[in-house]
Amino acid sequence: MIDLTSAQNALKDAYLVAACNQLNTKTNPLFAKIKQSSADVYGKQIIKMAPIGLNGGVGAGTETGELPTAKENTYVQFKTTLKNLYGTIEISDKAIRASANSNGAFVDLLNAEMEGLITASKFNLGRMLYGDGSGLVGKVSQYSSGVATMDSVKNLMEGMVVDVYNSNSKTHSGLRISYVDRVNKTITFTIAPSSNLVAGDLLYVQGSKDNEITGLGAIFDTTKNLYGLNRTTNKWLNPYISSPESAQEISDGVLQTAVDFLEENTGSNIDFITCGAGVKRAYQQYLACYRRNIDVTVLEGGYKAISFNGIPVVSDRFIPDDTLYMLDSTKFTLHQLCDWEWIEGEGGKILRQKAGYPAYTATLVKYADLICDQPNGQAKFTNIASTVTNPFSTSVMVNGAGATE
């Protein structure tokens, strides 16, 4: 007969291993490529020594002259707090009792709950990876008759629970999104807010404001401190950023310029390119214009990608359509206190009754943050045109079709 003990054992043994594998390797191609380590974790903090430049104790001299003066490596200290990443499932007492005499029904119940948790966790981990750590998922531009028009809905999904802030004041909490209109960039909520939202309101994932991992958005935001260091006094932290006022076309020459600059000036080795869907389409059109074969490579986790000089180029839903990142993935580490684990209560219980409700909850947790050892060895392009000019005709390639100029 199925009971809470057998449910807990299944979650601890079979489902935890599967959840770790899915979250660590199937979240997205970049997350799968980033190494994970428990090194440099001290208590609740990550403290890491990052080298700057070269060792100074090298030089040439005469046969009998003085040897070069020894000069140690120059280091700075990166410091950040471990972020608390949670994922919770809930199973009603009625559902457990209803499946008590059927192993198949019980397995189906746990499978459905775990699949839902893993899907939601992968979505949010992928979003955080490209975020700035703030948890911001959208800005309201207009609100009318229960429908909020957003600046973007890339980071939003049905079922997501959000808090609403106006400036730094929370005005609404626990609003659940029931529908996302991706064409008109609007959202509606399961239960309408108690008071109207206003233009400029900011939406954050529930409880996540300023509590998420240090993603690419933070690494490339040169206006803010990084890992406790001031960028004004540590200019070497600033990455390569190309952001022209007028749209630039994607090409091998543009990409190679950044690769050469980073190799020559920082020693980084770009091994991963990720971009918005619009940029990927534009690059495919560029290759088609020059009658080139589009090489496809298979990445860790089974992901397929086109390539530039052997470097995989993948698109990601959380990157703006006109943006591209060029990364040396060996410089990124997800430092963690532990891998995903269940929060255990008294007696090692992971399924606990939800206070005041006939239901049980279990929570996955991971304490971690992302650190890039060499921020200046990474590159970002913005304002990339979604079309390319065909040099062999008078037409412009638009989404794969010729349009007369």
Image (cartoon, grey):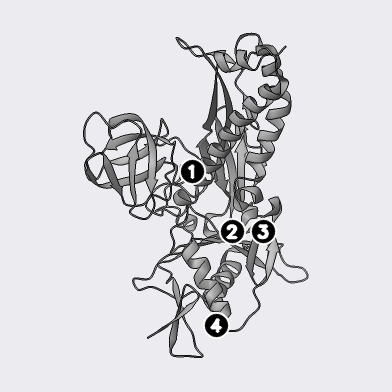
Q: What's the amino acid at mark 1?
A: Tyr
Q: Quadrant of the C terminus?
A: bottom left
**Residue located beneath label 3 in the image:** 57
Q: Are marks 3 and 1 in contact (CB under 8 Å)?
A: no
Query: How far apart are labels 3 and 4 at the CA level?
Result: 51 Å
Q: Secondary structure at mark 1?
A: loop
Q: Position of 231 compared to 313: left or right?
A: left
Q: Which marked residue is nearer to the observer: mark 3 or mark 2?
A: 2
Q: What's the amino acid at mark 2?
A: Gly
Q: Name the residue at 32% across, 30% down.
A: 191
Q: Earlier in the sequence, mark 1 or mark 4?
A: 1
The disc at residue 289 is 4
Query: How far apart are labels 3 and 2 at the CA level?
Result: 12 Å
Q: Position of 219 compared to 172: left or right?
A: right
**Residue located beneath label 1 in the image:** 227
Q: Secondary structure at mark 2?
A: loop
Above/below status of 274 relative to 16:
below
Residue 344's image quarter? Answer: top right
Q: Quadrant of the N terminus?
A: top right
Q: What's the amino acid at mark 4?
A: Cys
**Residue located beneath label 2 in the image:** 53
Q: Are marks 4 and 2 in contact (CB under 8 Å)?
A: no
Task: Locate residue 26, reporting x and y percent.
Answer: 64, 45
**How packed is label 2: few (under 14 Cα within 10 Å), some, or many (20 or more)?**
few
Q: Which marked residue is nearer to the observer: mark 2 or mark 1?
A: 1
Q: Position of 378 compared to 70: left or right?
A: left
* Residue 38 visible in this rendered orientation of the protein: no
